[in-house]
Image (tube, rainbow, N blue to C red):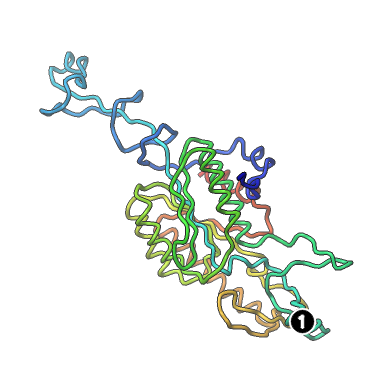
Amino acid sequence: MALPPPRYLRPQDLRRFQNFQFAARLIVEGFYAGRHRSPYHDASAEFADYRPYVPGDEIRALDWRAYARTDRDYIKLFRKDTDMRCHVLLDTSRSMAFRGEPEADPDTDPPPRRNGWRRLAPQRKQTAGNKSEEAPLSKFEYAAYLTAALGYLMIRQGDRASLALGADDLQVFLPPGGTMAHLYRLLYTLEQTRPDGPTRLSTALRALFTVARRKGLLVVLSDFLEAPEPLFAALSMYAQRGWQILLLQVLTEAEMNLPDAGRPLRFLDAEGPGMADADPNALRAAYRSELQAHLDTLETQSKAHRIHYARMTTATPYDQALERYLTTRSQS
């Protein structure tokens, strides 16, 4: 049975990313030919260093020219290029389904009044004639497009990409692969995934740590709307083992600023039963202060753990956001 064509990597995306290289500057472990340095020394084309001969070394490894110059036995060391393993963890919690626009729910909400409220929840926009048009990308869809693009970039440059999906636990793990067939499986898995459940990335990260056996690059895509302490406690396990870590935070403009609806809104907890009626204009200043404090904590903790951190909003086309990030990263 043929699989449907993937949504999260369109032909125009392939053409746009044709010249991108994801510059991950780290020493990696691996066994396959690629672009990155390996800590293993072995016979290959690039000389690394000398070391004294010790009993048990192969005689053929001796550098006879060095022996002729110094009258001492030396072994030549070489570095071999290997692939990089990139593990992408995508947050699939229910909050990632948010699209960022206040819409009326015809089943539960009364008709909007001049001083009435509308709820802030992801709904499909309605146009004249009661015809639905394409709704804005949710945070999950936006992050899934980024995941697809990163997977393509990694595999195209000779590296291996894995996909991990999780919210309050690790739900799906596709081991690293470096073929286009593996990329297709990754994209198909994204197609079948719907965000649900509470956010607890620390649990998913700890579970991923046990199955991702070899260090490499860890990319986490989430809105990171959770307590930073357990999150960075889990990330520190990777940092201490020499992983390179990248956090890509995806938010909506409504979450950054609160919508200017001109009337009270009903705010619903995306991952619980809580709700509150409030005027966004009345609480915008306090909200922005609290949100900025949270974002500052994420950025400060990332720097303290030597973690790369970047923030994106769904208002910016994902390909432009990724291109901007890659360009900035390659110049740093």
The spot of residue 73 in percent (x, y) is 14, 21
Tell me if 321 is positioned left or right of 64 in this view. right
Tag count: 1
| Direction left: furthest residue | 55
The spot of residue 255 in percent (x, y) is 63, 69
Q: Quadrant of the N terminus?
A: top right
At label 1, which amino acid type do we have? Answer: Arg
Tell me if 17 is positioned left or right of 32 in this view. right
**Of helix, strand and loop, which one carries label 1?**
loop
Give whichever of 121, 63 is nearer the camera. Answer: 121
Above or below for 152 versus 207: above
Callout 1: 10 Å neighbours few (<14), some, many (20+)? some
Kindly identify which residue carries mark 1.
263
Give whichever of 172, 229 is nearer the camera. Answer: 172
The spot of residue 266 in percent (x, y) is 69, 81
Which quadrant of the structure image shows residue 276? bottom right
The spot of residue 152 in percent (x, y) is 56, 42
Tell me if 57 is positioned left or right of 5 in this view. left
**In the image, what residue occupies the spot 44% across and 55% down?**
307
| Direction front: furthest residue | 1
**In the image, what residue occupies the spot 68% across and 55% down?**
316
| Direction right: furthest residue | 129
